[in-house]
Amino acid sequence: MSSDLRPDAQPDAQPDDQPDAQPDSKPNGRRGTGPEGGLADALVRTRRFFTRGKVSQDLRTLTQKGGREADDFYRDRWSHDKVVRSTHGVNCTGSCSWKVYVKDGIITWETQQTDYPSVGPDSPEYEPRGCPRGAAFSWYTYSPTRVRYPYVRGVLLQMYREAKAQHDGDPVKAWEHIVENPQRAKAYKSARGKGGLVRATWEEASEIVAAAHVHTIKKYGPDRVAGFSPIPAMSMVSHASGARFVNLIGGSMLSFYDWYADLPVASPQVFGDQTDVPESGDWWNAGYLIMWGSNLPVTRTPDAHWMTEARYRGQKVVAVAPDYADNVKFADEWLAAKPGTDAALAMAMGHVVLKEFFVDRQTPYFTEYVKSYTDLPYLVRLDESGDGTFTAGKFLTASDLTEREHDENAEFKTVLIDARVNEAVVPNGSLGHRYGDDGIGKWNLELGDVDPQLSLLDVADENVLVRMPRFDTPDGAAADLPRGVPARRVDGHLVTTVFDLLLAQYGIGREGLPGEWPSGYDDAGSPYTPAWQEAITGVPAATAARIGREFAANAEESRGRSMIVMGAGTNHWFHSDTIYR
């Protein structure tokens, strides 16, 4: 018997009627371990033996019956006993309505409500309202990282326990033992901000707080206890109960509004109210929208669609942000002002608007607006500095006028010049009309027959130099700019209008007025010009001037359909009220 030992020799063929026969080698003489080898076939047959179901001849299809028990886990994930309406009390301005699905008293999932009333065919609907954070809020509610127990700084808790043991369990004496000793007080105060919080019982944490209150009131009086609560929109129960407690013990209750840095003072000073902001749906009506320090897709997620949809009807969107935030990608233009320099950019844009729409050319719509709704026509007293110059003083009020000094609340009623008769008058709407019988029917902005004189330039008795403060010196030293304003005497008081002072502050020169004035938009050495702001903000001077011009031009053509959406991004600096202004 002979055998062929050539590398390409083929083994004897197996008969077709022996399907279980396996070749033990490949054409190259090696054993079959590849996809078509005998070992692979054996594995396939083994898999088929242990598989419950019918396998097709080509081994491509597996057919099984039953065995759907694995779906029960998925189906139970979405099962529920009831659906309740709720929202998320986290101080979110969205206040979205949610359907919360509950099973056995546990939130299983949530979806957006879809029953908001329609606003009609001329505006996008309010729904759907919600965001990914709201859709995942049940995960936050039951998160293992959620703080559910009181924590105390470890060094303080240890000292308190030791002091309490030394003073026969008296909590007040234990607290006094800590805070009246400078070294012990410094030990726990210096640990702040460094972590080290340890879990305590509710009883012990409450005892420490109570002991601190009693000791403070006993030694210093109740007014040395200051209370600060969360905003009511976040937790009405916490706010109400905490405020009630502090007031009942005679403590000083601080405002939850202090959460917002300089916003509490800035908003009433500049806008006249406490952030009673326009309805978000009104973004749709704007033809020119500037997002200034407000990252709408992130912080106003349920409202942002009005901005994105308005772009389809021709709205221009500008984003002012130091970083490429989420809202920037929705903007037609991005002004990347350096952090904290927003006021400089706004002043430069205001410089352009005042010069081109109030001085170089009178814009009737703007003029009537500022006469009716702002304090620009009101008179301000000018106080002499002693060197022939003046500084802006207080508003001229009815108490400064001989014929009106005995009026009810006269010191709170501001005065302006009525252009019809060229005399000082007291219009409606000042604080003095808010209270008292004399103010009945006058707590409004109705001017009646009064035509406010916006500028005294054409009716002035003289032009005087007023020293306007400047805050851009390299070393931060005090400085001022002498700039001229038109003035006149009213009942012995030298006065000018807020509008005239505003033009002087912005550096808008007019013929015949003395002082130091910018030579043009490209004068980088004079405050509030576009070129001046470029070195501070990094925004090109031409861009700042153009955006300011476009914003005002759109407002003129559309009768006010230009809008700025301001956010807290401009509010994280000292003196942020100046940025708002």
Image (cartoon, helix red, strand yellow):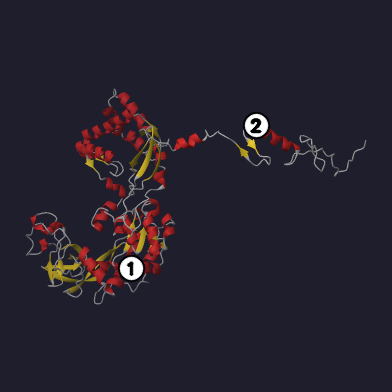
Q: Which residue is rendered at x = 67% and y = 32% of the image?
A: 49
Q: Are marks 1 and 2 in contact (CB under 8 Å)?
A: no
Residue matched to label 1: 554
N-terminal label among 1 and 2: 2
* Residue 111 versus residue 76 in the image, above or below: below
Quadrant for the N terminus in the image: top right
Asked whether residue 451 appears in the rendered view, the answer is yes
Label 1 environment density (alpha carbons within 10 Å; few <14, some 14–19, many ≥20): some
374, above or below 364, in the image: above
Residue ID at (65%, 31%): 50
Q: Nearer the viewer, residue 104 or 545?
A: 104
* x and y percentages locating residue 354 in the rendered image: 29, 69
Checking the image for residue 350, the label placed there is: none
Q: Residue at x 14, y 73 (%)?
A: 420
Q: Nearer the viewer, mark 1 or mark 2?
A: 2
Q: Nearer the viewer, residue 406 or 176?
A: 406
Q: Quadrant of residue 268?
A: bottom left
Residue placed most toward the observer, 179 or 528: 528
Quadrant assignment for the C terminus: bottom left
Q: Amino acid at mark 2?
A: Phe
Is residue 69 left or right of 22 when viewed as pictured?
Answer: left
Q: Amino acid at mark 1?
A: Asn
Q: Which mark is residue 50?
A: 2
Across and down, in percent, residue 223 comes to 21, 39
Q: Secondary structure at mark 1?
A: helix
Q: Quadrant of residue 451?
A: bottom left
Image position of 74 (left or right of 532) = right
Label 2 residue SS: helix
